[in-house]
Image: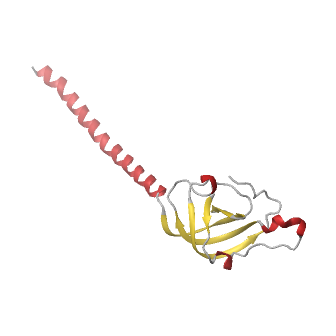
Amino acid sequence: MAENDQLTTPDAAHSGNRASRIVPIGFLCALALALVINNVRGKSDQTLAGVVVMDYPSYRFYPDLKDCHIKGTPYWLMPNHRFHDVVPMPSTSDIDHLDLALHAAWRVKLHGNLSPIGRYGFQAKYWREFDVLYVIDAMQLDCKDEDIKTTP
């Protein structure tokens, strides 16, 4: 009978040990899920810096970029009615290069609302949409040597 007690005791200890491992693993999974959900949902009143590329009449926003070397995943940008008060539209008097008035890039700092992950913009090519509330700062970039006119 004593031998039977010794055989069942290690099994009981082993299953108790397994339960003590499952709880922290379950907690870490729940924490990871909460972080993913927080990152996926939309955010209001965000200030973002990056590069805005205009291919008239659409705008793409590349967060955290500072120059014409476009990389990363763009957001569909929804400018407000006062956007061009701070971010001037490009102009040209050269009739042979009217495309310069339709394509431009700016380094900007914007304040607005970031959408949840979804499908936005022309042909739903963009994962997020940034709705501009106001422009904090803008500087036009000279990207003539870069190919910024390609859409994602």
Question: Which residue is rendered at x = 14% and y = 21% of the image?
Answer: 4
Q: Is residue 77 left or right of residue 150?
A: left
Establish if 1 lies above or below 58. Answer: above
Question: Which residue is rendered at x = 56% and y = 67% of the image?
Answer: 131
Q: Is residue 39 left or right of residue 31?
A: right
Q: Is residue 120 left or right of residue 51?
A: left
Measuring from the top left, give residue 24's x and y in whole percent. Answer: 33, 45
Residue 62 or residue 96, whichever sits in front: 96
Measuring from the top left, give residue 26's x and y in whole percent. Answer: 34, 44
Q: Residue furthest bottom?
A: 85
Q: Residue furthest left?
A: 1
Question: Which residue is rendered at x = 74% and y = 73% of the image?
Answer: 89
Question: Which residue is rendered at x = 51% and y = 61% of the image?
Answer: 115
Which quadrant holds residue 51? bottom right
Measuring from the top left, give residue 43's x and y in whole percent. Answer: 48, 64
Measuring from the top left, give residue 39's x and y in whole percent. Answer: 48, 57
